[in-house]
Image (cartoon, rainbow, N blue to C red):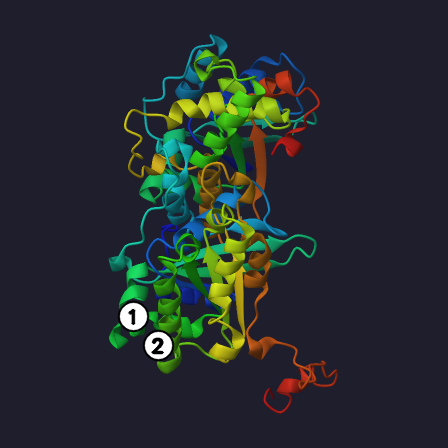
Amino acid sequence: MLSGKALSVNDIKRICRRSYTPIIFMAGETACGKTTLIASLHDAFLFGPLSGFHFAGSETLYAFEERSFESRASSSGIEPDTARTRYENGQEYFHLQLREQGSGSVKEVLFADMSGEFYERSLYSKSEVSQFKDLRRAQILLLLLDGAKLVDPATRQPIRANAMQFLRRCFEERMLSEDTILQILISKWDIVRQRSQAEQDACMNFVTSRLNEKSLARQVQVAPVASRPGIGRQSEKLFGIRDLFPIWVRTVPVALHASPKIDAQVDEASGCYNKFKGIIP
Amino acid sequence: LIASIVVLGLPKAGKSSFIAALSHVLQFKEIETALTLDHLSDEGRYIFEIRADWQACKPFERTKGGTVHPIVFNLRDESGHRGAISFPDIVGEEFEEQWSGRQWSLDFLATIETATGLLLFINPLTLTKPLSIADVADAESAALNLLGGEDSDDVDVNRNARTRHLPEMSAGEAIAREVTAQAEETKNASGTPSLWDPRKADAQTKLVDILQSVAIFKDGQRWTLGVVVSAWDAVEMHLPTMLPSRWL
């Protein structure tokens, strides 16, 4: 039977071979909410479909439950928490198989998680960036920034500066391909929402003023999220995630896009896509 | 042998009760059935004992023997066609061990290898929703508001515990039931979360894991799967018009 534990890069080859499977790569400092985001997806599926997708299986159920445990009432804790992802675990992958409502098509998706220590070390050490080598095969990079720190003028500067430095490292080391979609998520938005509208706007502007398409010379989306809000803010559960989740699942690599430049009609005579005529005998 | 049905389910899901009741119905014909017992099995001590316990409304002795108890019913239909159906009784602990230890027992492996169909048992009295600490805390304050500021100490923590997971209650009822039951589990003296224990994982996830494991083991086989919601009388008592498929 399956181990149910988080997958290694060798494990995911099997999944990626059997169907096209987008990899959502998560990066961010320690305790910014990477693992909580992953655990909140699992928790959501325990109560029904999410954003038009039904749960249809997972090779990492045991790992999901382990990550969710400290947020559950059954843990006997007082405050919801998520077990810290350990540095020695290296790169870990979480798997979901989904069935789309309506079409019934089955899709798979992988979430790549790793300790925030990798992110922090990569800021000052080129050699540590090599730990992010799996980023090259990812379709989406989620860079999570801690909203609770961004909303506070006393703690916001290093968060943004570190994000910029991390991205620069990735560009310099060619870790981020042109096709990789960059999404910057301001996590713990439920905490930000407790502030005035002016402070919320300032928080968002602080990020977008420097982390934008012009300064990064690539497409970038900035979105506020609240995966698992704290006590008293449950109405905001999965805020932002519900909108992003279908994008993650439906992402296809540029090579598979029906580009207007490619006439992807099936040639009836040969049975091949025109794109491949001459290549496939 | 024309079929081998494997009964799956966590502890106290009602698997043994079902098999004992099935044996009773087939043999004593108290109600009309399409199939009846043709002749007794050569070796039937286990089914004899659990049926006797069931008839006497006694709890089953679960510690005797191994994890898989072979049971065969020799049946015939109205036209006289005969056939045997294997209905092994697998103790619920086997499935808890599979989840925690991530391996099957050899007995279970042998059972699955020859299986032709699956019956998954779910007990609505033990299948609780995996509420988060925040869910419970928020619901607790909402429940106290609904109760008009009634002191939480005055809430009868036992009155709804048996039906706390039943769907389609009013929002107030649902909140009050969940809270009174789970607040007891949440609160402890130190407030320190207990260490990760696989046994405390969500029951629904464990059931999915069991089914996934069987599906992967015989990749490509199209299984016939029946889902049995046991103790249905407990659901009907509160939701008389509820259908099992909707409850699921």
Percent x, y for residue A211?
47, 71
Q: Residue at x 56, y 59 (%)?
A: A244
- Quadrant in the picture for residue B32: top right
Regarding mark 1 in the picture, which secondary structure is present there? helix
Frontmost residue, B86 versus A3: A3
Q: Are marks 1 and 2 on the same chain?
A: yes
**Residue B220 visible in the shown view:** no
Whether residue B146 is visible, yes or no, is yes
Cβ atoms at labels 1 and 2 below 8 Å apart:
yes
Residue that label 2 marks: A169
Where residue B7 sits in the image (x, y, percent)? 49, 33
- The chain containing the residue under callout 1 comes to A
Question: Which class describes the residues within 10 Å of circle 2: few (<14), some (14-19), or many (20+)?
Answer: some
Q: Amino acid at mark 2?
A: Arg
Q: Please identify the residue farthest to the bottom as the structure is shown.
A: A278
Q: Which chain does the numbered disc 2 sit on?
A: A
**A69 on left or right of A228:** left
Q: Indicate whether B71 appears above or below A257.
A: above
Q: Quadrant of residue A265?
A: bottom right
Please report the residue visible at 46 percent of the width from the left and 22 percent of the height from the top: B181
Where residue B47 sits in the image (x, y, percent)?
A: 44, 20
Q: Residues within 10 Å of mark 1 (few under 14, many from 20)?
A: many
In the rendered structure, the answer to whether residue A83 lies left or right of residue A101 reads left
Q: For the view shown, which residue lies furthest in the top direction? A: B56
Counting residues from the N terminus, which is met first, the one under dot 1 or under dot 2? 1
Disc 1 residue type? Ser
The residue labelled by disc 1 is A122
Residue B84: horizontal and vertical position, in percent? 54, 31
Which numbered tag is attached to residue B197? none
